[in-house]
Image: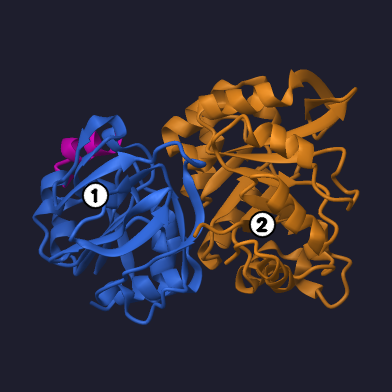
Chain colours: A blue, B orange
């Protein structure tokens, strides 16, 4: 079973719809046992980091997510919370990725909102996805470049658009809202 | 490189699209889900659904429509019209809308912007502003453009950004429906005073208008309704044209 983690910072409906469009069944839950025994876990997120992190901690979801052995996909705020630290609300994250998250300098319009391309795409998530493809982004904070980057994006500065370490995968953009390219990426994750 | 967004807008009444139903060969234009899917396939970057249903009872139709759209559409979409409380916004977002747009209700109660941004994130709040040039000054109008507020466009846009709006959808009443092009001066006024994305709306009549708006203002998106519904300009045609004119599009 595929589990989408339910917490206070997710537009889980879009992710659920996207997974179902690909023909997979899924459940949206915050039940720790359900999450632990699932085959794949999606950790979505939109909203503010500090509040989201507090909510995860209060419900024991922080330790649960960190301890998962099956493939996990963080999306948007999910990616940022999987990092060490984010400047948003001065928040310590789950520390899965040894990467820090910073606010974009105000050198251009913030948030980075709209369709952008990626480069240096690596690994299973990007199988069959060309660097000409576009993904939908909306965020004001970014993960710094890192050896864990499996895709980069350029807006105001170059940053990590996707990260991977062991069974943990994460993307800054919204594959569930990124047309057919996003569907391909989700399909790649779901068939890991 | 971040691309400029092209956004078709669908006016919805009692669950049906009210523009475009007369267009021959576009028989299903009355069904929002079908029209939306077609636009998404053709390369629309986002969609806006504006509910012009007058009564509260009919709002339920909108909620079930949002559910249906969210199931079908794999690009972001905004829902606007009649969002008066943070609960209205949260309800539509929980049904699968990515963003909500607020207009008159936010002018009457600016805290609404702040409350939705807090509950759902700034990225989910589009501040829609209807502006009209009166005696050389751009002023904010509400209630579908019927009521003057006396509020300066730039003041309201800046205040909206401060309150947590993630984006501004600026419609010029002077240009809307004229097909004479977007209001470049109003867009620059707002664009130079805020640091959030601005969507240009009102006045699109031909391909050149889109090149002009993207080269003469810092609008990151352009919205249009009738030219797409009546098939005067198709989205693929517009995208190709913009690319040829060095405007970055998807």
Kindly report the secondary structure that dominates the magenta region of the rendered protein: helix
Q: Quadrant of residue B132?
A: top right
The label nearer to you, 1 versus 2, is: 2
Q: Residues within 10 Å of mark 1 (few under 14, many from 20)?
A: some
- Asked if the stretch drawn in magenta spans residue A59, the answer is yes
The picture places residue B79, in percent across and down from the top left corner, at 62, 47
Chain designation of label 2: B
Image quarter where the C terminus of chain A lies is: bottom left
- Circle 1 residue: A30
The picture places residue A186, in percent across and down from the top left corner, at 35, 70
The dot on residue B7 is 2
The picture places residue A81, in percent across and down from the top left corner, at 24, 45
Q: Is residue A103 left or right of residue B5?
A: left
Where disc 1 sits, the SS reads loop
Q: CA distance from mark 1 to mark 2?
A: 35 Å
Q: Is residue A43 left or right of residue B199?
A: left
Q: Is residue A134 left or right of residue B158?
A: left
The picture places residue B239, in percent across and down from the top left corner, at 68, 68
The dot on residue B58 is none
What's the magenta region? A51-61
């Amino acid at each position: 079973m595929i589990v989408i983690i339910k917490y206070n910072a997710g537009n889980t409906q879009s992710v659920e719809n996207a997974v179902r469009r690909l023909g997979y069944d899924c459940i949206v839950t915050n039940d720790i046992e359900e999450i632990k025994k699932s085959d794949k876990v999606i950790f979505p997120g939109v909203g503010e980091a500090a509040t989201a992190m507090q909510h995860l901690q209060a419900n024991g979801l922080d330790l649960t997510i960190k301890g998962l052995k099956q493939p996990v996909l963080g999306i948007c705020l999910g990616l940022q919370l999987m990092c060490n630290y984010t400047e948003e609300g001065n928040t310590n994250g789950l520390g899965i990725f040894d990467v820090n998250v910073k606010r974009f300098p105000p050198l251009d319009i913030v948030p980075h909102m709209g369709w952008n391309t990626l480069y240096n795409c690596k690994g299973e998530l990007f199988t069959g996805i060309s660097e000409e493809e576009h993904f939908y982004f909306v965020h004001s904070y970014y993960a710094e470049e890192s050896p864990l980057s499996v895709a980069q994006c350029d807006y105001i500065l170059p940053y990590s658009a996707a990260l991977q370490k062991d069974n943990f995968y994460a993307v800054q953009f919204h594959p569930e809202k990124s047309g057919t390219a996003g569907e391909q990426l989700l399909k790649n994750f779901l068939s890991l | 490189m971040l691309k400029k967004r092209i956004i078709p807008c669908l006016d919805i009444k009692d669950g049906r699209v009210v523009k475009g139903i007369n267009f021959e060969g576009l028989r299903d234009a009355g069904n929002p889900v079908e029209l939306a899917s077609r636009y998404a396939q053709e390369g629309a970057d986002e969609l806006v659904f504006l509910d012009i249903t007058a009564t509260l009872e009919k709002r339920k139709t909108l909620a079930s429509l949002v559910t249906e759209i969210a199931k079908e559409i794999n690009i972001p979409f905004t829902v606007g019209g009649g969002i008066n409380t943070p609960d209205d916004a949260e309800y539509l977002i929980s049904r699968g809308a990515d963003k909500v747009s607020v207009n008159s209700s936010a002018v009457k109660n600016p805290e609404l912007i702040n409350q939705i941004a807090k509950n759902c994130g700034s990225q989910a709040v589009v501040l829609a502003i209807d502006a009209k040039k009166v005696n050389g000054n751009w002023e904010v109008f509400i209630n579908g453009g019927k009521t003057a507020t006396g509020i300066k466009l730039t003041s309201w846009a800046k205040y909206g950004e401060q309150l947590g709006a993630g984006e501004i959808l600026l419609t010029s009443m002077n240009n809307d429906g004229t097909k004479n092009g977007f209001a470049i001066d109003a867009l620059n006024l707002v664009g130079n005073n805020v640091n959030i994305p601005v969507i240009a709306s009102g006045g699109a009549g031909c391909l050149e208008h889109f090149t002009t708006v993207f080269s003469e203002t810092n609008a990151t998106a352009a919205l249009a309704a009738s030219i797409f519904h009546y098939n005067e300009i198709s989205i693929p045609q517009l995208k190709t044209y913009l690319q040829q004119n060095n405007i970055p599009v998807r």
